[in-house]
């Protein structure tokens, strides 16, 4: 007799994410559905047009014929992609850094939970028996795209060089990445970028600050919000941190990164990496492309207090970072109207297909529910 496996375990196994907790497996299923609908929209336009043209419903054979192969492709190829090994590596690096200042945080695991169409991380504790950080694939993916777009610019500033001909290319890559991020269209984001930077410090900073922020939540969960393991904060920021754990977690993150930077002073852009997401988000929030965050402080506030913390740490590196900000702003200023135009066109077009996309979503939902009852699972 074949042992029956529920759909959550099946998906975890199929995606190679076998060490997820049960709660995470449920989240994984949700993420997989969101991603596979986005995947269908960006890759299967013709199929979508046919569904609309013939008013196909989910039970129609032709509908199944159009949607099923895309879903199979998604499950057999895209779902397996993850950043798990990178996350495991970062966790070790961060734990070792904290050990240097006598801090240990109990964390059972850090897990990549799919969803390329999102940037988010979460710390959760199951009655202190299972303490985990969950991170969406999109977080690392977009860190990668943004750091690749900006790094050549920052390197040219570090080297006091005039901007090269390639700068225009990277500026365009930045625009594509922003549009790809906001519209969940990975075909746009996945534009070819052939130049691989030698120094990964900007990327490390962008990725590590998010993990360190969650480590901050884990720390306060374990030791309480009044425990502060680093040098004392200025009074105004200390008060903010005491009343808002998000601010405290940001401060924890930047102090951890600073401790890391002290161990590896060659990583010149790592501290700026901690601010870059917030700088980009502040532009997008200001332009009303992204809504104001509900749970976290506004991105321009986060950007400013992180930068002023860097200024306190190291005024020399801070003045270099100020130049980065001015230069980065030119990417946004010159691309802004084009970005807005493309995003609203994309959203309007997608809106037209919303009823069909809802059907695709309910088909996928139903498909996974059936998988839990029958052992049958799509094979290559
Ligand atoms: Zn947080």
Image: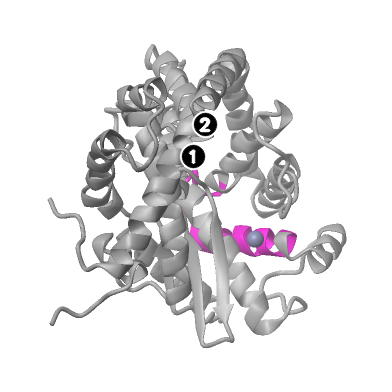
Q: Mark 2 highlights which residue?
A: 354
The answer to whether mark 1 is within 8 Å of ligand 1 is: no
Picture quadrant of residue 304: top right
Considering depth in this image, is 136 or 254 the residue closer to the camera?
A: 136
Q: Can residue 186 be seen in this view?
A: no
Q: Residue at the location (71% across, 29% down)?
A: 288
| Residue 266 magenta-highlighted | yes
Q: Residue 256: horizontal and vertical position, in percent? A: 57, 64
Q: Which mark is residue 358?
A: 1
Considering depth in this image, is 349 or 113 the residue closer to the camera?
A: 349
Picture quadrant of residue 4: bottom left
Q: How crowded is mark 1: few (under 14 residues within 10 Å), some or many (20 or more)?
A: few
Provide the secondary structure element on which disc 2 rests.
helix
Provide the secondary structure element on which disc 1 rests.
helix
> Quick check: which quadrant has ligand 1?
bottom right
Q: Residue 179: horizontal and vertical position, in percent? A: 50, 26
Q: Residue 347: horizontal and vertical position, in percent? A: 55, 24
Instruction: Report if the CB atoms under discs 1 and 2 are less than 8 Å apart.
Output: yes
Q: Residue at the location (45% across, 32% down)?
A: 356
Q: Residue 114: horizontal and vertical position, in percent? A: 39, 54
Chosen colour scheme: one colour
| Quadrant location, the N terminus | bottom left
Magenta-highlighted residues: 247-271
Q: Residue at the location (50% across, 68% down)?
A: 133
């Amino acid at each position: 007799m074949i042992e029956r496996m529920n759909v959550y375990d099946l998906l975890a196994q199929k995606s190679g994410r076998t060490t997820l907790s049960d709660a995470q497996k449920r989240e994984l299923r949700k993420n997989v559905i969101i991603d596979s609908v986005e995947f269908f929209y960006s890759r299967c336009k013709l199929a979508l047009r046919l569904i609309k043209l013939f008013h196909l419903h989910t039970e129609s054979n032709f509908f199944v014929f159009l949607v099923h192969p895309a879903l199979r492709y998604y499950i057999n190829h895209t779902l397996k992609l993850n950043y798990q090994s990178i996350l495991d590596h970062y966790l070790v690096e961060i734990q070792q850094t904290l050990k240097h200042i006598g801090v240990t945080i109990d964390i059972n695991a850090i897990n990549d939970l799919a969803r390329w169409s999102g940037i988010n991380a979460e710390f959760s504790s199951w009655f202190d028996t299972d303490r985990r950080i969950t991170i969406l694939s999109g977080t690392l993916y977009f860190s990668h795209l943004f750091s690749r777009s900006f790094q050549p610019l920052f390197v040219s500033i570090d080297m006091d060089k005039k901007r090269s001909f390639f700068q225009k290319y990277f500026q365009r890559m930045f625009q594509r990445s922003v549009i790809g991020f906001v519209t969940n269209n990975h075909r746009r984001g996945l534009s070819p970028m052939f130049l691989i930077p030698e120094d990964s410090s900007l990327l490390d900073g962008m990725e590590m600050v998010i993990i360190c922020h969650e480590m901050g939540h884990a720390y306060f969960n374990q030791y309480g919000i009044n425990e502060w393991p680093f040098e004392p904060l200025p009074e105004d920021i200390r008060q903010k941190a005491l009343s808002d754990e998000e601010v405290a977690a940001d401060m924890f993150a930047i102090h951890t990164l600073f401790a890391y930077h002290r161990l590896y002073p060659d990583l010149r852009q790592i501290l700026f990496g901690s601010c870059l997401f917030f700088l980009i988000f502040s532009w997008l929030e200001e332009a009303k492309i992204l809504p104001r965050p509900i749970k976290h402080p506004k991105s321009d506030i986060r950007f400013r207090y992180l930068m002023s913390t860097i200024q306190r740490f190291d005024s020399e590196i801070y003045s270099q970072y100020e130049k980065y900000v001015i230069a980065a702003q030119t990417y946004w200023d010159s691309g802004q109207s084009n970005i807005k135009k493309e995003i609203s066109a994309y959203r309007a077009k997608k809106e037209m297909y919303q009823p069909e996309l809802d059907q695709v979503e309910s088909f996928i939902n139903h498909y996974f529910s059936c998988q839990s009852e029958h052992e049958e699972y799509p094979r290559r």
